[in-house]
Amino acid sequence: MRMIRPVPPCLLLPALLLAGCTSLPPAPCRSGERAVVVETLYFGTATPDGRVSAADWQDFLAREVTPRFPQGLTVSEASGQWRGAGGRIVQEATHVLTLVTTDADEAALPAIITAYRTRFRQEAVLRVHHAACLAG
């Protein structure tokens, strides 16, 4: 009888971590739907000297986002918290930008993120994306 040796724990953890980096292929869309990408960006409003004003946010949307995504976008207001690079918990008001786009449009997102981080001296902008099907 052949003995099966268990996988050493030191090899199991990296395998599990790498498995989390893979993604399942998107489910095929139904008839009449088309494949899209939903991008959600989280823009914190706390700055080293205060916060991003409503006027500054509207100006940022007009200059950086709308020209790249003239077909439309959704903005929601939220409250969030995250751990900064120094380990401190930061709580702040947040603008949540949702874009329904195609893979080809994704190239514009790093430029938007960089522009916001530079203009408002932000440590990070959170980006979440997932595949979806668009009907209508």
Image (tube, rainbow, N blue to C red):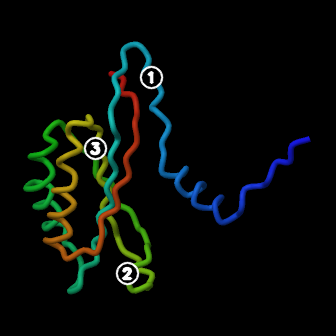
The amino acid type of the residue labelled 3 equals Leu
The front one of 41 and 79 is: 41
Residue 76 position within the rendered picture, expressed as x and y whole percent measured from the top left: 33, 54
Residue 91 position within the rendered picture, expressed as x and y whole percent measured from the top left: 41, 77
Residue 3 position within the rendered picture, expressed as x and y whole percent measured from the top left: 86, 48
Asked whether the beta carbons under mark 1 and mark 3 sit within 8 Å of each other, the answer is: no
Residue 45 bears which disc, if any?
Answer: none
Between the C-alphas of marks 2 and 1, the distance is 39 Å
Q: Residue at x 44, y 84 (%)?
A: 87
Mark 1 vs mark 3, foreground winner is 1
Going by the image, does 97 lie left or right of 21? Answer: left
Residue 28 bears which disc, if any?
Answer: 1
| Residue that badge 3 annotates | 99
| Residue that badge 2 annotates | 85
The amino acid type of the residue labelled 2 equals Ala
Q: Residues within 10 Å of mark 1 (few under 14, many from 20)?
A: few
Name which of mark 1 and mark 3 comes first in the sequence.
1
The amino acid type of the residue labelled 1 equals Pro
Between the C-alphas of marks 3 and 2, the distance is 28 Å
Q: Residues within 10 Å of mark 3 (few under 14, many from 20)?
A: many
